[in-house]
Amino acid sequence: MMNHYFIKKVVAIILIMLISVSIAGCGNSDQKYTRTDFMMDTVVQVTAYGRNAKKAVDESMNKLKEIDNLMSTQKSGSDVQKINDNAGVKYVKVNPETFYVIKTALKYSKISDGYFDITIAPLVNLWGIGTNHAHVPTESQIKDAMRYINYKDVLLDEKNDEVKLSRKGMAIDLGGIAKGFAADELENIMKENGIKHALINLGGSSVYLYGSKPDGSNWNIGIQDPFGDKGTYFAIVSGKDMLIDTSGNYERYFIQNGKRYHHILNPFTGYPAESGVVSTTIVSTNIKSIDADALSTIAFILGVDKGMKLVESMPGVDAIFVTPDYKVYATSGLKGKLKITDSRFKLYENR
C-alpha cells in the first residue's frame, strides 16, 4: 500500500514558492507582498498589491491561523473538537464564524439531498485517507460508521450560537467548506485595506482572483491536470473578481492492490465517490467562496449529468467536469472563457 499525500505536501510547497517568483514579475506595481505557509492542512499563498499590501497579507495569514484553530478536527480546543467531544451530551457554544460555516454546510446538505454532509467524520476517520494509517475498512466497519451520518441530527441554537450533535458517536468535519469561508474572510481583509489587486491561493483547490492584475488585465489561472503532478494544468480560465474551487480524486488518496481510494466519500455508500468524474471545478463571479467550496464537492459526487443540472440552475455559477477518458464538460457560461492547453483533453460544452 502506498500513501502519496505527504509527498505531495512537499511538492506543493516547492511549486507554490516557484509560482510566487513568477507572479512577482507580472505586475506594474512595485508595492507587492507575498507570503506562503502551511495552514488548514494545505499550502496557502496570499499575494496583494498596493500601499497596504504587507499589512493585508499579514492580517490574512493571522486570520487563516485563527480559522484553523476554530474549525480543525485536529487542533486541541477547537470548536469542532468541542462539538464532537460533546456529541449526544449537550449544546456547545461556538464562535459565530464557526456557527455560520456549520449553518451554511447544512444548507448545502439540504440542497444536495444529503450528498454533502459534515457528519461524515466517522467515515473520514475510519478510512484515514491523507494520514499514515489509510486503509480499506471492512464492510461491517463501514456500515457501523454510516449509522452516525445524518446532517439532520445536527441541532442549532441560533440565538446563542450553540451546536449539538444529537447522538453519541457522531462527529463533524468542516474540511469540505472551511477553506471557502477562509477565502471570503481574506477578501474582506483586502477590501478593508484598500487593496485593488490580490491573489488568494488556498492549496490550489480554492483560488480567489481579487480584482484584476495590477496592469488591468485578467488573471490567467491553470486548472489542475487530474492525471498529472501537483501544479501541472490542462486548461486555463481567464478572468477577474472570480473564484475557482476544485475537487478531485488526485488530492488525497492511497493505492491498495492497484486500486485508488480518494478522500471524497459518498455518505450513502460509505466508499470514495464513483460518479464517472476525476475532478470538478466551480467557477463564479456571483457567489461566495464558501458556496463554491461546497458545490465543487457536491458536483463531484453527483457526476456530470446531475452536477451540471444543479450548477446550471444557479445564476452566475459554472462548472468544469473531467472524466477518466480525458473528456471535459463545461457549463454554458464558460463558453469562450475556458482554454484547453493539453491536447489529450477534449472540450464538450454540453452533455
Image (cartoon, helix red, strand yellow):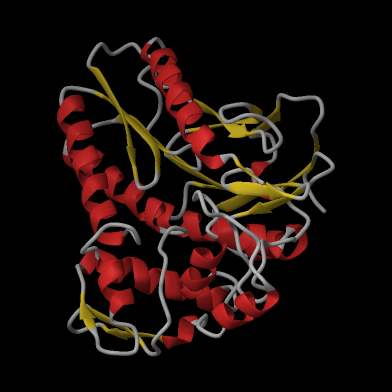
Q: Locate residue 24: give its quadrant.
A: top left
- Residue at horizontal 51%, vertical 83%? 150
Instruction: Please state which of residues 240 and 321 is positioned toward the viewer in this rendering.
Output: 321
- Residue at horizontal 77%, vertical 62%? 305
Instruction: Please state which of residues 126 and 112 is positioned toward the viewer in this rendering.
Output: 126
Position of residue 157 in the picture relative to residue 87 (left or right) = left
User: Does the rendering let one see residue 241?
Assistant: yes
User: Does the rendering let one see residue 320?
Assistant: no
Residue 1 in the image, given as x and y percentages of width and height: 67, 46
Residue 73 in the image, given as x and y percentages of width and height: 35, 62
Q: Locate residue 26: give its quadrant.
A: top left
Instruction: Please state which of residues 238 and 84 is positioned toward the viewer in this rendering.
Output: 84
Position of residue 167 in the picture relative to residue 246 (left or right) = left
- Placement of 324 over or under 227, stated as above or below: below
Quadrant (top left/top right/bottom left/bottom right) for the C terminus: bottom right
- Residue at horizontal 50%, vertical 38%? 6
Residue 2 in the image, given as x and y percentages of width and height: 64, 42
